[in-house]
Amino acid sequence: MRLSLQGAVLGLSLLPFWPLTAQAEVQLLMFEQPGCRYCAQWNRQIGPKYPLTTEGQQAPLMRIDIHATLPDGITLRSAPVFTPTFVLVQDGVEVDRIEGYPGEDFFWGFLDMMIAKTSEQMNSD
């Protein structure tokens, strides 16, 4: 009896995670480089709170040096030229990007619009 109870508890504990496997993986790539003053400004204004926000939960941040080789599984429309460049990817494919750092207020608005595009794409598939 104890084994079946443990199995039932284990099965129930996995239920809340089941829908996550059906969702597309969304990430925010931040292309940066040492000495970039706008990267430093983003790091001061947004960086510490980003993972605590709804946007940070929906699109976790991956930092990439602009001169580094692109990680496997990432497909961009074009190579980033400016730092910082923020690229939202869905399942490793670019959805949209922000080139430069427009300041805290504009950043959140632009990011919210980009995340909305991923929702639209998921609903149209």
Image (cartoon, grey):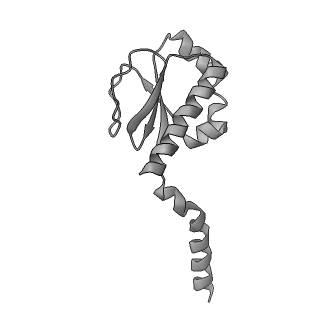
Front-most of residues 59 and 48: 59
Q: Would you place residue 38 above or below residue 95 in this image?
A: above
78 sits left or right of 12 in the view:
left
Q: Residue 99's spot in the image, x, y percent?
A: 47, 19
The residue at 33%/24% (across/down) is: 78
Q: Residue 112's spot in the image, x, y percent?
A: 59, 33
Q: Residue 53's spot in the image, x, y percent?
A: 66, 37
The residue at 35%/34% (across/down) is: 71
119 sits left or right of 67 in the view:
right
The residue at 62%/82% (across/down) is: 5
Classify residue 54 by image quadrant: top right
Q: Can residue 24 be seen?
A: no
Q: Would you place residue 115 above or below residue 8 in this image?
A: above
Q: Can residue 5 be seen?
A: yes
Front-most of residues 124 and 56: 124
Work out which residue is located at the far front of the displayed protein and give it.
124
Front-most of residues 37 and 34: 37
For the N terminus, give its image quadrant: bottom right
Front-most of residues 6 and 69: 69
Q: Residue 28's spot in the image, x, y percent?
A: 50, 33
The mark tally for this picture is 0
Q: Would you place residue 96 above or below residue 121 in this image?
A: above
